Amino acid sequence: MSDIPIRGDALQPSTTAARLKDAAQGGKTEFGAILKDKVNEINQLQLDADQAITKVEMGNSGSIHDAVIALEKADLSFRKMIQVRNKILEAYQEVMRMQV
């Protein structure tokens, strides 16, 4: 594999960061709204990667390097989303196993 370190904060959008900062300062931020924003951003990364690949295929001033970078960003963010989903499901299942 590669020895290039990948920073998770490079994928953090300004809108989500602003919401989290607002929540830390005492403002109300809904988890669902943050989750929806992240899913939309991951979708946009996927669409950007598709466009970059299409540019390379058509020869429209698209470089393979840019397409691979866009594809890796989309892949990493998707994998991150899957891990968050798994953690949410585990937490839900744990709550459901609790006896009241």
Image (spheres, rainbow, N blue to C red):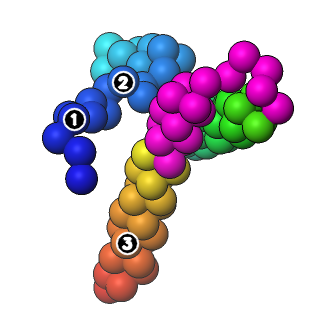
Farthest residue, direction front: 59
Disc nearer the start of the sequence (1/2): 1
Name the residue rendered at 21%, 35% in the picture: 4
Where disc 2 sits, the SS reads: helix
* Magenta span includes 74: yes
Name the residue rendered at 47%, 59% in the picture: 82
Q: CA distance from mark 3 to mark 1?
A: 31 Å
Amino acid on which disc 1 is placed: Ile
Say which residue label 2 marks. 10
Task: Report the disc number at residue 4.
Answer: 1
Where disc 3 sits, the SS reads: helix
Task: Report the disc number at residue 90.
Answer: 3
Q: CA distance from mark 1 to mark 2?
A: 14 Å
Which of the two residues, 98 or 53, is positioned nearer the viewer here?
Answer: 53
Farthest residue, direction left: 3
Using the rendered view, name the quadrant where residue 74 is placed. top right
Whether residue 89 can be seen here: yes
* Foreground: disc 1 or disc 2: 1
Disc nearer the start of the sequence (2/3): 2
Which of the two residues, 56 or 46, is positioned nearer the viewer here?
Answer: 56
Q: Quadrant of the C terminus?
A: bottom left
Provide residue 95's location: percent of width, then percent of height. 37, 73
Amino acid on which disc 3 is placed: Glu
Region in magenta = 58-75
Q: CA distance from mark 2 to mark 3?
A: 27 Å
